[in-house]
């Protein structure tokens, strides 16, 4: 499980930390900080870190590929990622045999302007059986306040990840645009879920690169999903695809952006909406923000959704009356056997 520390300035993050379990979450080792993956100095009095890191198992090379967003900060911790060339996508490789992480490498992208500030952050990736990696990214549209998304097709040889091509560009030029997409393959199709300040979006594809027009996430009764300004993620089972999400409602307006609880519900993959009757609370509202999070298939019988309660100076670093104390959560979704996705 990858983690990072939130520092005292808003959106100022440390380098990579990680934890390990050898018994499916009964006990954990760590967190460990990797010396050569810490924040590092840059020119002009800036420093950088790689955060929002998603690890994925790459079976062809027997390595863990970890992909995240690289951000530059000034001395006070204010990020300058809105400036071209001050942000990007980075990756590192974990080799389980020597129990060793590589250093961060920048994902080299074409010189086109759309790639001058292009990142993958808190995004679920997809590894095809042949080892091809599909990496959802969002990029700054130069000269505008908007961000758009696409999916990169990359090759990975166990050491280096290389860009091959990218697919459809999806855009919504309102607020800040689109961000933090996540991809899943289910039932012969690929699905993207996409963040926006005012709503969430979904799109589908046959090849993982070229997508049908996206549509807002809604419940089957037509109501908006209510997931604002944060991510959604996927978990899947042989008999269904499920979405994990936040939803702004009357009962959680004390939580910024409605970022707690995290819900899970089944998706109708034909109509691309969420079945309200299947909704359950996955991680509870304990008076602190959740929101940006991760999801992964761990075994054929279970998937995990991980998050951390956001306890910081606005709360005086004190626990809430509802019990929120900054805990890291591992929500285990247990599937009935057999599960052969």
Image (cartoon, helix red, strand yellow):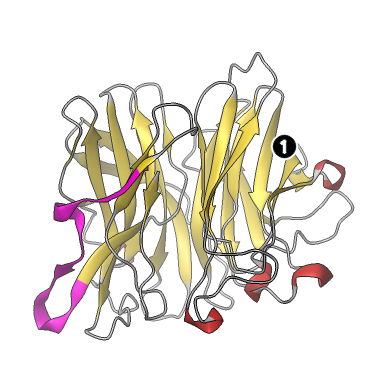
- Looking at the image, is 143 positioned above or below residue 3? below
Q: Which of 50 and 30 is in front in this view?
A: 30
**Residue for point 67% across, 25% down:** 335
Q: Nearer the viewer, residue 293 or 205?
A: 293
- Looking at the image, is 7 positioned above or below residue 161? below
**Residue for point 34% across, 54% down:** 68
Residue 6 quadrant? bottom left
- In the rendered image, residue 37 lying in the magenta stretch gets the answer yes
- Looking at the image, is 52 positioned above or below residue 177? above
Tell me residue 309's x, y (percent): 55, 62
Tell me residue 183's x, y (percent): 52, 43
Q: Which residue lies furthest to the right in this view?
A: 221
Rate crowding at label 1 as few (under 14), some (14 to 19) or many (20 or more) other CA atoms within 10 Å: some
Horizontally, residue 231 falls left or right of residue 62, namely right
Residue named by callout 1: 269
Q: Residue furthest top?
A: 338
Q: Which residue lies furthest to the bottom in this view?
A: 76
**How many marks do you count on the picture?**
1
Quarter of the picture holding the N terminus: top left
**Residue for point 40% across, 21% down:** 129
Q: Which of 138 and 258 is in front in this view?
A: 258
**Res. 213 in view:** no
**Res. 282 in view:** yes
Tell me residue 120's x, y (percent): 38, 55
Element assignment for label 1: loop
Horizontally, residue 280 falls left or right of residue 5, namely right
Please report the bounds of the magenta region as a residue range: 30-47
- In the rendered image, residue 107 lying in the magenta stretch gets the answer no
Tell me residue 203's x, y (percent): 62, 48
Horizontally, residue 161 falls left or right of residue 236, namely left
């Amino acid at each position: 499980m990858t983690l990072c520390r939130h520092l005292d300035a808003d959106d100022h993050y440390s380098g990579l930390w990680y934890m390990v379990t050898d018994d499916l979450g009964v006990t954990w080792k760590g967190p460990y900080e990797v010396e050569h993956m810490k924040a590092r100095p840059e020119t002009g009095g800036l420093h950088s870190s790689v955060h929002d890191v998603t690890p994925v198992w790459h079976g062809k090379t027997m390595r863990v590929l970890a992909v995240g967003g690289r951000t530059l900060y000034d001395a006070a911790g204010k990020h300058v990622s809105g400036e071209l060339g001050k942000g990007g996508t980075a990756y590192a490789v974990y080799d389980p045999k020597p129990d060793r992480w590589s250093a961060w490498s920048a994902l080299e992208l074409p010189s086109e302007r759309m790639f001058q500030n292009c990142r993958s952050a808190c995004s679920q990736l997809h590894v095809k059986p042949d080892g091809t990696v599909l990496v959802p990214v969002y990029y700054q549209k130069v000269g505008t306040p908007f961000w758009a998304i696409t999916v990169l097709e990359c090759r990975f040889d166990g050491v280096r990840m290389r860009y091959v091509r990218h697919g459809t560009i999806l855009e919504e030029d309102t607020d800040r645009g689109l961000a933090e997409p996540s991809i899943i393959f289910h039932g012969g199709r690929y699905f993207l879920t996409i963040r926006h300040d005012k709503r969430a979006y979904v799109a589908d594809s046959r090849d993982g690169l070229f997508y049908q027009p996206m549509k807002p996430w809604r419940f089957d009764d037509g109501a908006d999903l209510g997931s604002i300004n944060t991510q959604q993620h996927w978990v899947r089972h042989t008999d269904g695809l499920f979405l994990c999400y936040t939803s702004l409602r009357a009962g959680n307006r004390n939580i910024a952006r409605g970022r707690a609880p995290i819900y899970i519900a089944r998706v109708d993959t034909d109509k691309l909406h969420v079945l309200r009757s299947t909704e359950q609370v996955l991680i509870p509202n304990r008076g602190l923000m959740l929101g940006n999070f991760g999801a992964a298939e761990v075994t054929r019988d279970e998937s995990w959704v991980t998050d951390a309660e956001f306890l910081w100076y606005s709360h005086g670093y004190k626990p809430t009356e509802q019990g929120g104390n900054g805990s890291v959560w591992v929500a285990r979704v247990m599937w009935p056997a057999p599960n052969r996705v």
